Image: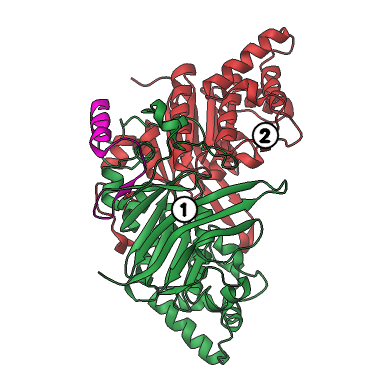
Chain colours: A green, B red
Amino acid sequence: MSNVVLDVRELTTKYVTRFREDVYAVDHVSLKVEEGRSLGIAGESGCGKSTLALSLMGYYFAPLHYMSGEIIINGKSISGMKPDDVRKSILGTEIAYIPQAAMNALNPTRKIINFIEDVIQAHELYLSKKDIYDRAIKLFETLGLPADVLQKYPVELSGGMKQRTVIATSVLLLPKVLIADEPSSALDVTSQKMVIKMLKQAMENGLIDSMIFITHELPLLYNVTDDIMVMYAGQIVEKGTAKQTVFDPLHPYAKGLMGSIIVPEKGLRDVKLTAIPGVPPNLKNPPSGCRFAERCKYVIPECRVTSINLREVGEGRAYRCIFSEKELREAYQHEK
Amino acid sequence: MKNELCLSGSGLTKIFGIGRQRTVAVDHVDFQFYAGEIVSIVGESGSGKTTLAKMLLGLISTTEGEIFFQGKKRDISSQKKKQEYWKNIQAIFQDPYSSYNIFNKIDAVLLDCIRMRGGQSLPRARKMELMKEACSFVNLKFEELTNKYPFELSGGQMQRLMIARIFLLKPKILLADEPTSMIDACSRATILEMLLNLRKETGMTIIFITHDVGLAYFVSDSVYIMEHGKIVESGTADAVILNPTQAYTRRLISDVPKIYEEWDLSTV
């Protein structure tokens, strides 16, 4: 078995609202990412994907609070560290995070190279300007970005180029895990492809050991990551390889998500899109039984009362449903 | 058989700036949109899609060329004529969060649409009925929406409310400028289905602007591909997407992630 880079055990985090109500946005999530592999997280808006990404960094600030569980990076536990220590010794060097609007991180009044200098200084790596420049040039070459970008101001760059510049900067300190939270959803398809290509290059050239990629765009996730995890209402509802999750989903929610796939391929024009009716539950007082019960087609009365655990079905596959694998497959078959 | 011509244009051009700043955003574009058709305009960022849309809506002036509406030359020289034109063409924009007046409640938004259709003197019960019908068309519950402000809804719900507005207004043409790019894949499926229903119910012409060839292929009857302000390829969706003749179209198609074919990353 290869080396596990990121090991998360039963992580639970909550938001505290201004009325002192607790919202458990990440609820007992366990996951493992091995070296050289990438994990995708799928789910609709409001399912806790981005909160999970923030929680994984171990850097908590109000209203997000740590509750329980453990985050282990390369054998070292980071849960319970002080936020300041996390920022100095973990972020950037162990875990790097790319938010959706990463390009907004750039300062409009300063050149890209100054931005990179700032990153290095913040991590107290006393390097000369010349060394920083050499390092940046080398990094940009590896990732296929033009070197003249370094001497430009952010306004001179296109959106896609800005996004790629910030991503390149985030892998500058060779993090073990890169968490990319919808890095391409604000871009058009061509720039999106360039971002994905760059992330793959970063993996191949050993700049990052592993990657967590978050998006609601399933065809994209299928092409980018090795494994896919589907989240619903703060819990993992399905886990498996990309192929298994997209072509043979087990959980009814995952099945529903696959109904929204649109691709320009022959014969896919007459596909009937099936959207899941309703909205995710309010996590202030989550339903006691299965959290998907309200919107599920196959719901039976027991679903609403018994809480269901993640069921392992071998080869790293797991799903969270009251029905057995066989029953679910029969139900889907029957529907066709 | 094709229906009658609804909106067409010849040699449509828009130039921004003069001298060194001169930018040709839309360059001698010809098009014919037929009644009851869903047409997609596809291109990457900066190809002039939105500029073309704004010209069609009459929000910006044209530098050159003519737009014909129902066979006659479009005349929007005065404010009154513009308002008359806007009864026939309506739009859904990319960002649902900035499409509403934040001070107006949702009932006011919908009542405004009824008034625009000349229904201000209808009895109150009839107005309620119309609003309920529009909301149920987009799977929203009118009872839950009354006394709410638009910002209390989610992005997907706002975009659906936008379609409810269009359902009330019943324009001849709907111009949808990237209506699904800011909402997640699951709500996107709902919105697209609703656009298809809208066409079925009202026979509206829908102009769908997007950068995603996949969406264009799914919803439209015919597709126009734009590159640097020019239309490089047009035809029925099947012809353009399955047998593209231009290198640019092939590139756009190859850039969309697929699930049955391999996604080639070496082309960018």
The amino acid sitting under disc 1 is His
- Residue B150: numbered disc: 2
* SS at circle 2: helix
Q: Residue at x 62, y 52 (%)?
A: A15
Of the pair B249 and B218, the residue shown nearer to us: B218
Asked if B158 appears above or below A39 in the picture, the reply is above
Residue A289 in the image: x percent, y percent?
A: 46, 36
Q: Quadrant of the N terminus of chain B?
A: top left
Judge from the rendering whether residue B252 lies leftward or rightward of residue A147; answer left or right: left
Q: Would you call the spot at circle 2 few (<14 residues within 10 Å), some (14-19), or many (20 or more)? A: many
- Which of the numbered marks, if any, corresponds to residue A67? none
Q: On the image, which quarter does residue B52 sit in?
A: top right
Please tell me how crowded label 1 is: few (under 14), some (14-19), or many (20+) other residues with Cα within 10 Å.
some
Q: Residue at x 41, y 32 (%)?
A: A303
* Res A146 quadrant in image: bottom left
A332 lies left or right of B59: left
User: x and y percent of residue B155 in the render?
Assistant: 58, 39
Do the residues at discs 2 and 1 belong to one chain? no
Q: Is residue B65 visible?
A: no
Question: From the viewer's perspective, is residue A219 above or below residue B114?
Answer: below
Residue A149 percent location from the top left of the image: 52, 75
Give, as a single range, the part of the protein colored magenta: A313-336
The Cα–Cα distance between marks 2 and 1, rounded to whole angstroms, is: 34 Å
Residue A28's disc number: 1
Q: Residue at x 31, y 32 (%)?
A: A271
- Is-magenta flag for residue A320? yes
| Chain bearing mark 2 | B
